[in-house]
């Protein structure tokens, strides 16, 4: 069993401590609002509008959405749990990260929640504990993709690539034309795992994914090396200063037409259109090396879980059950222009409608989606090492060795 202190990790930053202090002051009593902890600060206004739908039908329940900085959230949550704060619903990382919290015994199991019956086994597995019980209501379905500017491609007579070599040829043609092919940020290491999953998922076989799950994967193998090489091959086509570039800056480059492509998640589509409503874009999934189908990297992006010690247990459970309904899922998809995990919830904008259809046929869960949040955190070790390789601090061989070492250590726990 992992202790809460182990979940805390390193000491809190000043920002984290300030946020935690505010959270503690707003914890409330048993007759206060149901608190909903989240790492999605940018979604605050949207969630408040969505929760208004619930409270209009439940006049006896009020809801307080409490978002924190994404990079500070895990520390803030761990400390709040350790301090015994009055927590109700918390946003839960999927896969290993959520499983470690579930294994502390602090979450209420949800297996008897009727609203979860229609969810896919795969989405529920992503929010289950080591005991096999379900501890979260899956929220969003992510697709990690390469977004490209259709006008720039058309202007330079660059065809939509259908293979990885064609993609590299397109990058070379764009660079030759004096353009930045890819607006990419490398300042936050987690963005590099997103980049990797978006371009390299089709370079891994189903057998490799199975090996990751059964403990026999080899992250020094030629197959994994070839998949990582795809990211290394993109270095000539990203801004020279990309390691120090924030994602907001990279996003603005693409939205303003100063770069032809931007690699991230589908959740960036709406923010990009907010920056430039006239932006004409399409997306590429992970392309095959030669002939063969594309593979669209996808997975569960978080869930909401119920604290077993919630002083408002009945009210919080009622809210959580509503978050598993089509009414919530549709409101989520419409408000945030994202794909919902809730059965029956439909996307509205054309790109997400297309993504939903493609996920159903070629959606693939990259193994790193299931490796984040463990102890040690294999995903974090990989992305930090990848950042080091791209920044010239370590060699690729060191990256593979570090990843394998972290993976083996995580399997021994």
Image (tube, rainbow, N blue to C red):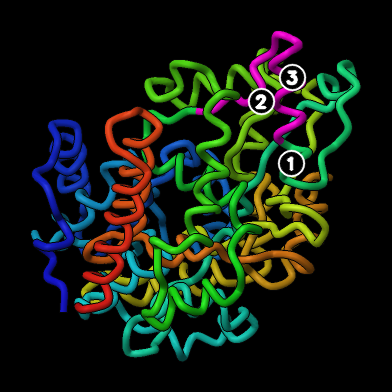
The magenta segment is 168-184
Residue in view at x 16 percent, y 44 percent: 25
Assign the C terminus to one quadrant of the image.
bottom left
Q: Residues within 10 Å of mark 1 (few under 14, many from 20)?
A: some
> In x, y percent, where is residue 73?
28, 47
- The tag on residue 274 is 2
> In x, y percent, where is residue 43?
50, 41
Q: Earlier in the sequence, mark 2 or mark 3?
A: 3
| Residue closer to the observer: 248 or 400 | 400
Does dot 1 land on a helix, a strand or a loop?
Answer: helix
The Cα–Cα distance between marks 2 and 1, rounded to whole angstroms, is 32 Å
Would you name the residue on which mark 1 appears? 165
Does dot 3 land on a helix, a strand or a loop?
Answer: helix
Residue in view at x 36 percent, y 56 percent: 379
Q: Magenta stretch: residue 195 in it?
A: no
32 shown above or below 391: below
Residue 368 seen by the camera: yes
Q: Earlier in the sequence, mark 3 or mark 1?
A: 1
> In x, y percent, where is residue 364?
64, 66
The Cα–Cα distance between marks 2 and 3, rounded to whole angstroms, is 25 Å
Left or right: residue 305 compared with residue 402: right
Residue in view at x 26 percent, y 42 percent: 72
Question: Between tags 2 and 3, which lies in front?
Answer: 3
The Cα–Cα distance between marks 3 and 1, rounded to whole angstroms, is 14 Å
| Residue closer to the observer: 317 or 293 | 293
Q: Residues within 10 Å of mark 3 (few under 14, many from 20)?
A: many
Q: Earlier in the sequence, mark 2 or mark 1?
A: 1
The quadrant holding residue 316 is: bottom left
The quadrant holding residue 374 is: bottom left
Left or right: residue 354 compared with residue 121: right
Q: Are marks 2 and 1 in contact (CB under 8 Å)?
A: no
- The tag on residue 174 is 3
């Amino acid at each position: 069993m992992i202790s809460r202190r182990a979940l805390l990790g390193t000491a809190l930053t000043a920002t984290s401590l300030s946020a935690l202090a505010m959270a503690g002051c707003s914890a409330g009593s048993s007759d206060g609002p149901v608190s909903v902890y989240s790492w999605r600060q940018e979604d605050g206004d949207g969630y408040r509008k969505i929760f208004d739908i619930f409270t209009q039908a439940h006049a006896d329940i009020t809801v307080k959405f409490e978002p924190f900085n994404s990079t500070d959230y895990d520390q803030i949550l761990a400390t709040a749990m350790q301090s015994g704060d009055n927590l109700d619903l918390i946003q839960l990382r999927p896969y290993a990260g959520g499983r470690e919290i579930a294994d502390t015994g602090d979450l209420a199991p949800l297996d008897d929640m009727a609203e979860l019956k229609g969810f896919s086994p795969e989405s529920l597995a992503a929010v289950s504990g080591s005991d096999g019980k379900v501890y979260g209501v899956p929220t969003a379905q992510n697709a990690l993709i390469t977004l490209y500017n259709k006008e720039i491609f058309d202007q330079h007579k660059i065809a939509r690539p259908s293979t990885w070599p064609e993609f590299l040829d397109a990058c070379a043609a764009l660079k030759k034309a004096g353009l930045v092919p890819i607006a990419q940020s490398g300042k936050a290491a987690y963005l590099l795992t997103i980049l990797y999953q978006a371009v390299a998922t089709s370079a891994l076989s189903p057998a490799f994914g199975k090996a990751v799950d059964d403990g026999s994967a080899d992250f020094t193998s030629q197959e994994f090396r070839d998949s990582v090489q795809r990211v290394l091959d993109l270095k000539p086509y990203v801004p020279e200063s990309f390691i120090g570039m924030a994602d907001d800056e990279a996003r603005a480059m693409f939205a303003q037409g100063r770069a032809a492509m931007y690699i991230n998640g589908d959740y960036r589509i709406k923010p990009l259109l907010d920056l430039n409503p006239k932006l004409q874009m399409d997306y590429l999934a992970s392309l095959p090396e030669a002939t063969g189908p594309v593979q669209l990297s996808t997975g569960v992006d978080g869930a909401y879980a119920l604290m077993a010690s919630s002083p408002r247990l009945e009210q919080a459970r009622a809210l959580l059950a509503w978050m598993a309904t089509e009414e919530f899922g549709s409101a989520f998809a419409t408000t945030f222009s994202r794909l919902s995990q809730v059965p029956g919830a439909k996307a509205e904008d054309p790109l997400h409608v297309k993504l939903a259809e493609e996920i159903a046929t070629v959606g693939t869960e990259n193994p790193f989606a299931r490796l984040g949040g463990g102890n040690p955190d294999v995903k974090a070790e990989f992305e930090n090492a990848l950042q080091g390789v791209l920044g010239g601090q370590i060699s690729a061989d060191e990256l593979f060795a570090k990843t394998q070492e972290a993976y083996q250590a995580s399997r021994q726990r």
